[in-house]
Image (cartoon, rainbow, N blue to C red):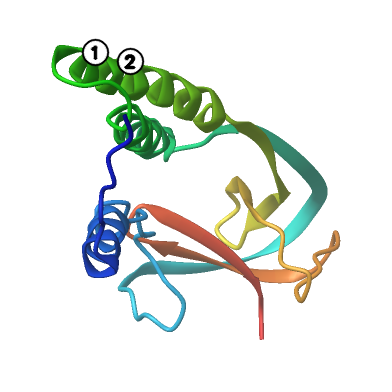
Amino acid sequence: MFKIITVNVKSIFAVLLTMCLFCGQSQAAYERNQAVPVEKVIYGQIESVKNITEKQLVEDSHSGWKTFGGALVGGVIGHQFGGGSGQDVATVLGALIGGGIGSQHGNQQYYLETKLVELMIKQEDGSQVMVIQDADPGMRFAAGDEVRVVYLSGYVRVDLAM
């Protein structure tokens, strides 16, 4: 009634390694210790500072792999039962049930909280610009601070003037 399936540890490792390789994470366009071309730098003075907390609902991006893994395990377990066409039915049912369980487990959501700072800056040319950027605990801004507004390709960054 029960069949014994021998699974090589190397083959399990190979499947897991392959799954990990296809689950790559996206990378930011601008990383730490990377030189990027600066379009222009304008100095100015901060007129107002507002700290903002942004909450974002994040869904688990690996839910498809959890569904696949559940179907794979369910199919292997289902294959242990029955014989002939009954074994095929048990394998398919095991895969469907395992995939359903994996899908339910993979459907996870959580909140990601980001601390931002909104800066209203009067630039030396008289224009005003508002910049919202990630809050850096090592760089506190206050009204009246002299700053430099660094314009990068598609990005703006505000730092305290030196």
Amino acid residing under circle 2: Leu
Image quadrant in which you'd find residue 72: top left
| Vertical side of 141 occupied by 3: above or below | above
Callout 1: SS: helix
Q: In this picture, is 111 found above or below 143? A: above
Inspect this view and state whether residue 131 appears.
yes
Instruction: State the residue in front, 38 or 92.
Output: 92
Dot 1 amino acid type: Val
Q: Nearer the viewer, residue 115 or 72?
A: 72
- Judge left or right: residue 67 versus residue 112: left
The x, y position of residue 84, in whole percent, is 14, 18
Q: Looking at the image, which residue is at 34% across and 60% down?
A: 29
Question: Which mark is in front, 2 or 1?
Answer: 1
Alpha-carbon span between mark 2 and mark 1: 6 Å
Residue at 15% x, 13% y is: 85
Q: Position of 39 compared to 155: left or right?
A: left
Query: Which residue in the protein does label 2 denote?
Result: 93
- CA neighbours of label 1 inside 10 A, class few (<14), some (14 to 19), many (20+): some
Which quarter shows the C terminus? bottom right
User: What residue would you read off at disc 1?
Assistant: 89
Based on the displayed image, in which of its 4 quarters is residue 57 positioned?
Answer: top right
Task: Indicate the position of residue 111 as horizontal and vertical percent values.
Answer: 69, 36
Q: State the quadrant of the N terminus.
A: top left
Callout 2–callout 1 Cβ contact below 8 Å: yes
**Residue 57 visible to an observer of this rendering:** no
Say which residue appears at 43% left-offset and 62% top-offset.
151
